[in-house]
Amino acid sequence: MKLAEAKADTNALIKRIDGDAHFKSRITAIGVTEDIPVQIVKNDRKMPVLIFCRETLIALDRADAGKIEVAEI
């Protein structure tokens, strides 16, 4: 499932990051990489998706969250 579709208060593992080279470079620079666990903190419609990853709270816009494939753990 896409990160934008994940439910709040769940844990997930990032499986794949889609998008162009600029997006992949930007997202990996902030620590969001494949095969790392994340906690979905908040995922309200029309709002950024908040995730907790590598001891950091990160806000991703919905378009960016739609490019990240996750699996619940």
Image: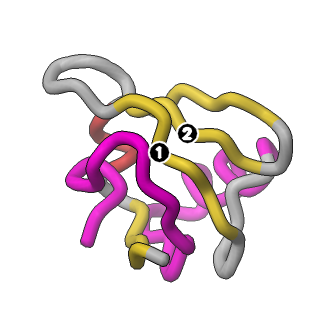
Q: Quadrant of residue 46?
A: top left
Q: In the displayed structure, would residue 11 be above or below residue 39? A: below
Residue visible at 39% across and 32% down in the picture: 49
Q: Assess disc 2: are there few (<14), some (14-19) or many (≥20) residues with their C-alpha within 10 Å of its C-alpha.
A: many
Q: Position of residue 24 (x, y in %)?
A: 61, 60
Distance from the alpha carbon under mark 1 to that under mark 2: 5 Å
Question: What quarter of the picture does the N terminus occupy?
Answer: bottom left
Residue with the mark numbered 2? 51
**Residue 58: percent from the left, percent from the top?**
63, 31
Mark 1 lies on residue: 40
Amino acid at the residue labelled 1:
Ile
User: Is 28 displayed left or right of 27 in the figure?
Assistant: right
Residue 45 % position (x, y): 15, 25
Q: Which mark is residue 62?
A: none
Q: Residue furthest front?
A: 9
Span shown in magenta: 1-30
Helix, strand or loop under label 1: strand
Check residue 22 for magenta coloring. Answer: yes
Mark 2: amino acid: Ile
Assess whether mark 2 and mark 1 are in contact (beta carbons under 8 angstroms).
yes
Residue 34: in magenta span:
no
Colouring method of the image: secondary structure
Q: Can you say whether 12 is above or below 22 in the image?
A: below
Q: Earlier in the sequence, mark 1 or mark 2?
A: 1
Instruction: Look at 39% across and 29% down and name the residue there.
Output: 42
Q: Locate residue 70: give its quadrant.
A: bottom left
How many numbered marks appear? Answer: 2
Residue at the top extreme of this rendering: 47
For the point 48% across and 34% down, the residue is 41
Which residue: 42% across, 54% down?
Answer: 10
In the rendering, at what x and y percent does residue 36 appear? 70, 71
Q: Is residue 44 above or below residue 52?
A: above
